[in-house]
Image: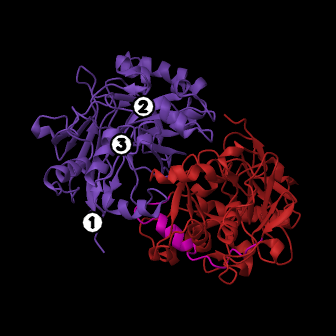
Chain colours: A purple, B red
Amino acid sequence: MKLATLKAGGRDGTLVVVSRDLTRCQPVPEIAPTLQKALDDWANVAPQLAAVYEALNAGAARHAQPFDPRTCASPLPRAYQWADGSAYLNHVELVRKARGAEMPPAFYDDPLMYQGGSDSFIAPYDPIRAKVSWGIDFEAEVTVVTTDVPMGIDPVAARNHIALVMLVNDVSLRNLIPNELAKGFGFFQSKPASSFSPVAVTPDELGDAWRDGKVHLPLRVNLNGKPFGFPNAGVDMQFDFGRLIAHAATTRELEAGSIIGSGTVSNKQGGLYGSKVENGGVGYCCIAEVRMLEIIETGKPQTPFMQDGDTVTIWMTDDAGNDIFGRIENRVEALPEG
Amino acid sequence: MKLATLKAGGRDGTLVVVSRDLTRCQPVPEIAPTLQKALDDWANVAPQLAAVYEALNAGAARHAQPFDPRTCASPLPRAYQWADGSAYLNHVELVRKARGAEMPPAFYDDPLMYQGGSDSFIAPYDPIRAKVSWGIDFEAEVTVVTTDVPMGIDPVAARNHIALVMLVNDVSLRNLIPNELAKGFGFFQSKPASSFSPVAVTPDELGDAWRDGKVHLPLRVNLNGKPFGFPNAGVDMQFDFGRLIAHAATTRELEAGSIIGSGTVSNKQGGLYGSKVENGGVGYCCIAEVRMLEIIETGKPQTPFMQDGDTVTIWMTDDAGNDIFGRIENRVEALPEG
């Protein structure tokens, strides 16, 4: 089934069930007014929402209305947890290679994960408001939303706690990162509000593309309408979502509605750290990787970070070319410098 | 006014107004069923809660019941944000001195802050469930809860966005920290669920002790019933709460109900990195500081981290000796090793 949250209705918006083809939706106040409320009692609520979904797809829903992703908030407009892994090690290798640092062997066995801010996400079509001097970048990723997860869960069992799958633009302020990481406490100011796909889907919606706790489909990124990347999210993902959830739950429980991210999707493409779309490669899901490649190849970066008015679009299609999650489309609305 | 959340009533519990002397309380379902709901509309709701508080203190509340902090959840049982600063630089200096590292000059001007997990806090009298081998420690701190904070706010103006003050035990797993910080992404597994004081109070409850965005009162910590520390939270706080909020809001808005922590309260006591209570000092708010001092003085730590059954108690009294926030009392319930 597919779910979304309309902006209307307060801080948590209004939960709607969305038709598979993303053309119609239906509010379900009698079942669950918000997505968090649904997740709080998922075992009972999900079957009721699924029944609405079936009726909607069959054209038999009584209160269906047109679905417009531009009226959507992120599916969870605010969440109790956003923990982002870094499961595509090519991304990490590339960043380290560019600064001449070795990849610690432990990184292949112990997931990187940071605690992100989750109190107010921007909507899928909202602007990114930031200073250009901060080095505005996107990171296209896949995420899952969990049910309640007990502490100490096994990575395979953890897969059963995945309620929903979404995409995210994990907005990153690259020029703030070096100073912040040097302080030793991880990202904070360098990771402003993220933006999630308008639609969250249950894993079964992905059919055969959902297996081994991974989404085996290309994640598509356009920058100003031009293809920037379409690496396959099922390839080179060192840690599947079950593993990432288990990592997050090692020393504490996770509350229902926790969002766990994959990290920037990145394909190695034969050990060459990938190649750009214009060079025949599958490209990249963030500007930073392109710049790292440019540094490795030519000694300095050429591609600038996002400028005022630049727009990034992130989406995923099924094998038939149909949009699964709707699209994230964030335009930079530059803040004055100083 | 004073507020608390009873565990009964679901994931977010039940908001109650608590009498100043912490003996009675009253649920306020017709005003706000939960603390988050109250914070979502604070400007309208706070005066209504204040009226109940006045009646309660006057003995005129119609539905008052006895207040038992053991039936309380953390005031926000789950929150949309928990961002913890490290404003008492003595704590940071001590930790760095013990490992022979210099204090970077920027640390005196640029607050350290990490994004903590906020999806499920333990209750003030709940046990800490963790493996002793993880190196279980407490960190006693002061925290504030904000209203909505716009991005880019000024540190002084930010003080006006403080709705409530609480205490916290920021539980820390010391033996997991070195590996985690070495990975570069900050704390995650090393910071399990925190525990907040049963009662949250508006700043005016602190009277003259609330000034310059700081709480000028000793924060009291007992370990197994013996005084471990009582440093003054108004002393040696390099960055006041307004400054910490402004730091958190530099690149993003903060949603109402964001919790901002002071970091472990620590007094320098004349440049000697403080001294233990048994040596006539004001002691410490975490075991790690004592161990650092022992390392500096003798080359190795003597005080062990928390063991199975150890209990930490954290509270604050006014000048007359009255408990302000109720007490945090967390007992270690050791998980099996392996």
Kindly identify which residue carries mark 3. Answer: A71
Crowdedness of circle 2 by 10 Å Cα count: few (<14), some, many (20+)? many
Q: Which residue is mark 1?
A: A133
Which contiguous range is marked in magenta?
B230-254
What is the quadrant of residue B20 in the picture?
bottom right
Q: Are marks 1 and 2 in one subunit?
A: yes
Whether tag 2 and tag 3 are in contact, CB under 8 A, the answer is no
Mark 3 surroundings within 10 Å by alpha-carbon count, few (fewer than 14), some (14 through 19), many (20 or more)? some
The reply to whether residue A268 is visible in this rendering is yes
The answer to whether residue B238 is magenta is yes
Are tags 2 and 3 found on a single chain?
yes
Question: From this viewpoint, which residue is outermost toward the front?
Answer: B299
Q: Main structural element of the magenta stretch: helix, strand or loop?
A: loop
Residue A62 in sight in this render:
no
The N terminus of chain B is located in which quarter? bottom right
Q: Is residue B111 left or right of residue A236?
A: right
Q: Earlier in the sequence, mark 1 or mark 3?
A: 3
Cα–Cα span, label 1 and label 2:
33 Å
- Pointer 3 chain: A
Task: Please tell me in which quadrant of the rendered image residue A230 appears.
Answer: top left
Residue B277 placement (x, y as % from top left): 81, 72
